[in-house]
Amino acid sequence: MAFQAPIRGSFDWGLVAATAALVILGLLMLYSATVSENHEPFRKQLTWAGIAAVVLVAAVASPYHFLASAAFPIYLATLALLGLVLAVGPEIRGAHSWLRFGPVSFQPAEVAKVATVLLLATHMSEKQGFGLSLKQAGKMALIVALPVGLILLQPDLGSALVFFPILGVMVFLAGLRWRVVVVLLLTVVVAVPLLWPHLKSYQQERVLTFFHPERDPQGAGWQVMQSRIAVGSGGFMGKGIGGGSQGQLNFLPDRHTDFIFSVLAEETGFAGVVTALFLYGVLLYSCLVTARTARDRLGASISMGVAALIGSQIIINIGVILGLMPTAGIPLPLMSYGGSSLVSCAAALGLVLNVRMRCLVN
Amino acid sequence: MRQDYRQTRDYHEYTQEQLVSRRISILAKVAGGILGVYVLAFWYLQVAQGDHYAHLSEENMIRKVRIPPPRGALFDRNGKFLVRNRMSFGLIVHPEQVADFERTLGLLGRALDRPPAEIEARIRAAGAHQRSFHPVLVAEDASLGSVAFIEARRADLPGVSISVEARRYYEGGASGAHLVGYVGEVSAAELDSKRMAGAERGDIVGKAGLEKYMDSDLRGEEGYRRVVVNSVGRETGDLAGGVAPRSGEDIRTSVDLDMQRALDLAFGPDAGAAVFLDPRTGEILALTSRPGYDPNLFVRKLNRSLWRALVADPRHPLQNRAIQSAFSPGSTFKVVVATAALAEGVITPSTIHYCGGKAAFFGRVFGCHERGGHGAVDLRKAITKSCNLFFYNVGGDLGISRIAEYSRMFGFGRPTGLGLGFEEAGLVPDEAWKQRVRGERWYPSETISVAIGQGPILVTPLQQALMAAAMATNGTRPVPRLRPVGSGEERAGLPRRLGEPLNPAILEPVRQGMWGVVNDGGTGWRAKIEGFDVCGKTGTTQVVAASAGVKDEEKLDPRQRDHSWFVGFAPLNDPRIAFAVFVEHGGHGAQAAAPIAHQVLQVFLKKRAGNPAPSPPMELVRGVPGAHPRLF
């Protein structure tokens, strides 16, 4: 892929347009998928979209160096929120993931994703020379491990999972000595069997069902099958918005959250799918171009961290829709119902716009 | 010394930047590659396999809901209902729509006059909880009063609805039960049979009688609706493309409901069987088997204890004695022997035998029921007085082969072909039979017993009625039928009449004798109807040897009393009706069976005169006590 470096620092209207288009597409699908709930989630999400716009502007407004200098306090604050949610968060669907402030509730895990990206990027910019030492790698691993640990306690496997691609991309960019690679791999090999018994039974079930779908034709396997039927029956042009029988007749569980892309695929067909994937491609492309042209390592690291954060969620979520991955419980950025996810995506993309805008300013 | 440019900080940063750029390109290619694979995957699912998944999606949401067809009605020959469908109301609760559960249970309890806890238990037993949308049937066949109570409080009872379905209603109750039969849920074995093609579990099908043997006509063809259902099976809408059910055929039968009721009424508590038919066509006018049962009790789910009681009943109410039981014909058989003797020239109408009360044949002494003897007896007197000695002599002269030959000519020894289920063939004994079954030769003394209808000969009441029909007409017997002639139901390949016609000159003396039985001081005087010239022959079948010497039947244990026959036709000239009445343990044929025939014939006669007797009230037609369902 060839990158065309912008001649001068500019506002990335392409990224803004793609973001807005995806949010509008998401709202459209949300409207269609929530007929039975009288479009209540749609109205809520509309409000969140307004909030997200404000947050995006705020993330662009102050120079990213200034934000980076506050990265550590922000990180500590989100850790505190993650601790708080374990203490006082109500149990919803078996997990303590939500904090409620009056009418507003949000997931601290979504905030933690952005805060962690920022802190990791700050850490990367302080590094000199090629390759990470074991100490540096360990420090980065620790930055990730604290929020991941707290999120796993909720427990929210999906959200915890997203931190690893972020760390992976950061480490890949910094370069690793083989010694470090081996240590990290060993850590994973040891961690999996240690963590497995601590997973909730429904999480174990998800993983097992992915490898053996026939295990559970009624539960998770059923969901994957119904998603595949929804996608496939959409055909080339789809069944029309509001006309998807799989979504409208409730065959698709979680259709307005994790499975919103199935609704899109069913109602707008292959044409709609390609449009949405193109828009996501524009999003990721913008992040990568910004990373290439950033004036310093901090800007590049922020952009790549955001690319990893959003890109991995897109890839995992749609992979689940296609039945290529186990059901992970990861929302689709910008489209899934959920204010926290939308706002944190907006903040992350705001940071990328911020970096792009200031790539030539001294 | 000039520093190597490769050691400069600028160069170092430059190479670093180059490295990072290269790695960003690698990541971009990985991400682009994954998105490309996803596009291909979507292409495969949506475009290449789109039709397959569109089909699966339709299968997901479209269900066929069967609509059972209304079952055809059965009419009697005059268009009166024998069996019809009545409306049956069910009370249904849709738990999720119920606003106030306690209140609803209370009102339902009042409507059904049952404790609310019982209704709640019924809902729980159906596996439904308070939020379930699966409807629960809380009362089957609810009374009109309950339905009215619910309807009047419709606004207070959201989530309670009333279902209406068709149920069989048997007009006659126990009267004619064996003829009409009954329906029930199709059994597993029946589902596998060819006859029930298309039937599904829970379907109501004919189980016995006409309901069974006309089932394919009565059943009709089911239809279906196409409905859209959601993921939990709740119907959300109708689709075009359903098929309306085709109602079962309404069938007119040959039965006369008034005669049928009169017959059952006349029987009273006695066990037995009777058949009345048109001797010219074979149309069955009335057919009963007693005791009966009320088929209305079987229309849906069979009550287990009731069924067991019926099966275990020593009087076997489920058995159709008219066609499934064979008995000794007793003296009614003398009609056959007389006809055979005349046809074979063994006697003439004026042949005289002397009856002294008893005589020895082949070394054994045989008695007449008239101890003092009948004196000089000709054919007519032999029939009217039912003299045994006359027929001992005639039978001995005829021999068993010729008696068997004429018995078969009159239709004994094989099923009649009525088409109402399993039919007993009866038994016509002869030398070959004895050799085959008992392994010994026929003794001539056995012929003497058979000549008066005792011994091994066995006949069914229907066979007897057909024999009477043959006597009434020209010696051939009609094929019995349950649909009127000309109703389109002519069973292909079957002749209308069976047997060889006899010379009227041969039949006439026997018919005259039968007239005398009823009208000229004979044994069947109780069947006499002024001006109708009823002809008949009584018969008594000894149940145990003990009864042989007992004159007064009343003193005997009812289970040791003789069986009673009365077989005949009317009127003498141009007969319109033939019959056989059999009363188990009824004593002498003259006492029990003849009055029953008399009552039914009177109804027949009045109806023929255009002056139909009012049907007897239902309550008088006795069957299983208290068996009639409430009518609304």
Image (spheres, helix red, strand yellow):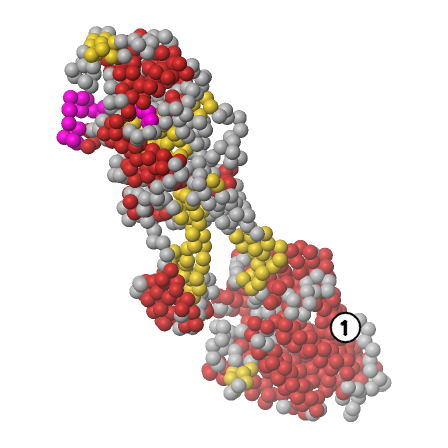
Closer to us: B618 or A28: B618
Q: Is residue A113 visible?
A: no
Q: State yes or no: residue B534 in magenta.
A: yes
Residue A277 place in picture, x, y as percent: 72, 70
Task: State the image coordinates of residue A61 (x, y, percent, origin top left).
Answer: 70, 91
Going by the numbered disc 1, the residue's amino acid type is Ser
Q: Is residue B405 left or right of residue A222?
A: left
Q: Is residue A271 visible?
A: yes
Residue A56 placement (x, y as % from top left): 68, 86
* Residue that label 1 marks: B25
Query: Within 10 angstroms of label 1, few (less than 14), some, or many (20 or more) residues?
Result: some
Quadrant in which residue B562 is drawn: top left
Does B459 sit above or below residue B421?
above
Residue B598 position, x and y percent, is 30, 32
- Which type of secondary structure does the marked residue at label 1 adopt? helix
Q: Mark 1 — on which chain does it sit?
A: B
- Point out the stretch of residues depicted in magenta: B533-557
Q: Quadrant of the C terminus of chain A?
A: bottom right
Which part of the image, by quadrant, shows the N terminus of chain A?
Answer: bottom right
* Position above or below: B363 against B207: above
Could you say which is closer to the camera, residue A318 or residue B7? A318
Residue, x 65% and y 77% (percent of image)? A27
